[in-house]
């Protein structure tokens, strides 16, 4: 299982990391709205490797058979490896390449409120909220934990769906062994 999990986890992680490195420096030109869509699309695409990893394990290691539990274990480990790459990449980008990200995101959020005609109280509350967010993001451990919550739920959903789709039911021969008599065909 280790080889399959590492192979597909590393590929998935590399995809999410490389895509983040490729588009995030252009967030000013892309805009935060499209940046979020692009980011989550990248995450979903990278987690397609979970499906292929489970299938590879089932076909190559399990001899064409896999239980939901084993499929889930393979998928969630691939997800965790991919998430580590995602978080690590973001940490490097946030602290070394784009240390002004929080300020840019604050400006974006406040400008949207102003454009929507929000009251001064609402705008001031958002400014305070964004200041608190910046304090949290400037702490590497909290930043990592918050960043982990972006890809992990998607990976968990993909793992659950993939495990359900790829699990295999017992064949007639397996059922015969379990109940001790041959099954008749209709």
Image: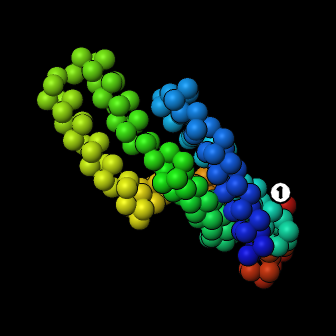
Q: Name the residue located 24 percent from the left edge and 36 percent from the top edge.
A: 126
Asked if residue 145 shows in the view, the reply is: no
Q: Where is residue 89 shown, x and y percent of the image?
A: 58, 55
17, 179: nearer the viewer: 17
Q: Name the residue located 71 percent from the left edge and 62 percent from the top edge.
A: 10
- Horizontal arrangement in the rendering, residue 82 relative to residue 153 (left or right): right
The answer to whether 178 is drawn above or below residue 153 in the figure is below
- At mark 1, the secondary structure is loop
Q: In the figure, residue 83 lies in which quadrant?
A: bottom right
Asked if residue 177 shows in the view, the reply is: yes
Number of marks in the rendered image: 1
93, 50: nearer the viewer: 93
Q: Where is residue 25 shown, x and y percent of the image?
A: 58, 38
8, 26: nearer the viewer: 26
Q: Quadrant of the C terminus?
A: bottom right
Mark 1 Cα-neighbour bin, 10 Å: few <14, some 14–19, many ≥20: few
Q: Name the residue located 45 percent from the left edge and 47 percent from the top edge.
A: 99
Q: Residue furthest left?
A: 121
130, 56: nearer the viewer: 130
Q: Which residue is mark 1?
A: 186
Q: In the figure, residue 176 lies in which quadrant?
A: bottom right
Which of the colour schemes (rainbow, by chain, secondary structure, one colour) is used? rainbow
Q: Where is residue 78 shown, x and y percent of the image?
A: 66, 64
- Horizontal arrangement in the rendering, residue 141 relative to residue 36 (left or right): left
Q: Quadrant of the N terminus?
A: bottom right
- Horizontal arrangement in the rendering, residue 148 relative to residue 155 (left or right): left
């Amino acid at each position: 299982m280790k080889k399959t999990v590492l192979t597909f986890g590393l590929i998935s992680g590399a995809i999410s990391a490389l895509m983040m490195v490729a588009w995030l420096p252009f967030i000013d030109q892309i805009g935060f709205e499209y940046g979020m869509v692009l980011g989550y699309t990248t995450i979903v695409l990278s987690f397609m490797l979970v499906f292929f990893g489970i299938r590879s394990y089932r076909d190559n290691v399990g001899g064409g058979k896999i239980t939901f539990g084993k499929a889930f274990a393979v998928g969630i480990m691939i997800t965790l490896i991919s998430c580590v790459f995602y978080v690590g990449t973001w940490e490097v980008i946030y602290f070394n390449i784009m240390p002004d990200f929080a300020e840019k995101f604050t400006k974006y959020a406040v400008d949207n409120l102003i454009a929507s005609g929000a009251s001064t109280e609402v705008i001031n509350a958002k400014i305070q909220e964004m200041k608190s967010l910046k304090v949290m993001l400037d702490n590497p451990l909290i930043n990592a934990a918050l960043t982990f919550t972006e890809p992990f739920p998607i990976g968990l959903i993909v793992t659950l769906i993939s495990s359900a789709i790829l699990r295999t039911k017992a064949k007639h021969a397996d059922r015969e062994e379990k109940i001790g008599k041959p099954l008749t065909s209709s």
